[in-house]
Image (cartoon, helix red, strand yellow):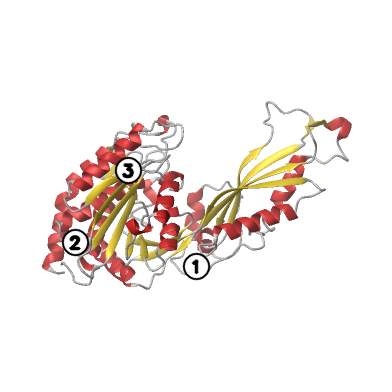
Amino acid sequence: MTAGERELRRSVRRLMPQLKAELVRLVGIPSVTFPGFAEAPGREAAEAVRRLFDALGLLDTRLIEVPGEPPIVYGHRAPPPGGPTVLLYAHYDVQPAGDEADWLADPFTAVERDGRVYGRGAADDKAGIVVHYGALRALEGRPTVGLTVVIEGAEERGSPGLCRHLLDNASLYAADAAIVADGGNVACGSPTLSVSTRGLVIVDVTVETLDGPRHSGVYGGPVPDALVALSRMIATLHDDAGNVAIDGLERAHYGGTPINENEYVRGVGLLPGVDVIGDGTLAERLLARPAVNVIALDAPDFESAGNIILGRARARISVRLAPSQGAETAQTAVIRHLQAVAPWGARVTVDRGTAMDGFAANVDGPAYAVARDALERAFAATCVEIGRGSGLPLQAAMHRAFPAAEILQWGVGEPEARVHAPNESVDLRELEGITLAEAIFLAEFAGSSAL
């Protein structure tokens, strides 16, 4: 270990009380930006983040206003002549807290217990903001790369404003490498790079057989029920083993770290006697193959149901895609399948919803080599590489705009973080380790080590 690296470690360690304080402050802003929630907390969070990075004195920081969306915090510092630029991404919006009775304390008042900071957004993704800030603080103005900081406020609902703005203003976001600080380690102390994500398409399928409901005693038998027709269509989406059975959906090869199926089954909450479905390895099923779920069904509830034949039924179908497959092509394949399997001449209408490409990183470039080394030095453990079942739209948008850029994803989440769930938290040791890894990366990526 060089003297420079020892000093960087000491610097990150000295910063930890301040980084914890900044995390506590950010968690205290209830920046839920879904429709129906107050807009003011989102803007408050954006302004707090802008001030945080502006105080570094490294960046030209500002808020980018995107119509109908929360502001994007943007900061930039040009690279030295011939040097690379690194984009640092995180997000300040958070999931709704849900029922506060499920939390041990107020979800927007951060509390520390046993080395963990609890609160909504503590891990996802306000700790990611603090990681970027802490790495730049630790370097004390010595990064040998250009910097672009992008902190958005709508990741939890698909980043529509940021992706649109990036594709329309590509020069603002051009970078040789990007660090997406919205990932996590497979376990505490096990440094992890997320190298692929599945895509997502959603379709709404409506089935009609009658111009209105009919009495089941008078018409039942020869008259087709729309909900039964829809149920038969849904049943064709999988084969008997539980594999997706839609022609045109791809399966990708998975070469990352395996997932222990026994451990997975113990933790997932399957009821006694219920099996996991599909064939192949668990990692392939979770990370490299399509998955189909019915996430909404428009049908009478028990309290209001009459003894009738339904003339109309509707379902929302969510399909996760192999990282290599284009979303629009996959969505067309799903629509074609549903139209082809409609029974009894039923009228079928399919509306396109979300269509988000997956992402598969090129892991053989120089940024990945430096990142693996930085993580292993920071954690004193071997770096592992995994896929993710769901991803960030930004990764696919960046890859489309800058195909040569290396996109890295790491972060402070790990199995105990309970991301999106009550009592979300972050382990302060993970926060310190990822901050140190990022500082090492920024010091060494240019090829002329500042350490």
- Residue at image coords 42%, 61%: 401
Count of numbered circles on the image: 3
Query: Where does the image place residue 342, in percent across and percent down from the top left?
Result: 76, 50
Asked which quadrant contains residue 247, the reply is bottom right
Above-or-below relation of 267 to 94? below
- Is the Cβ of the residue at disc 1 closer than 8 Å to that at disc 2? no
- Is the Cβ of the residue at disc 2 closer than 8 Å to that at disc 3? no
Query: Mark 2 = which residue?
Result: 143
How far apart marks 1 and 2 lie (CA) works out to: 35 Å
Q: Would residue 242 be visible to someone looking at this image?
A: no
Q: Is residue 150 left or right of residue 12?
A: right
Residue type at mark 2 is: Pro
Element type where label 1 sits in the image: loop
Which sits earlier in the primary sequence, circle 2 or circle 3? 3
Residue type at mark 1 is: Tyr
- Residue at image coords 37%, 73%: 364
Q: Would residue 372 be visible to someone looking at this image?
A: yes
Viewport quadrant of the N terminus:
bottom left
Which sits earlier in the primary sequence, circle 3 or circle 1? 3
Residue type at mark 3 is: Ala
Query: Where does the image place residue 139, in percent across and percent down from the top left?
Result: 16, 58
Q: Nearer the viewer, residue 139 or 270?
A: 139
Q: Nearer the viewer, residue 47 or 205?
A: 47
Element type where label 3 sits in the image: helix
Query: Mark 3 = which residue?
Result: 122
Closer to the camera: disc 1 or disc 2?
2
How far apart marks 2 and 3 lie (CA) works out to: 27 Å
Query: Mark 1 = which residue?
Result: 254
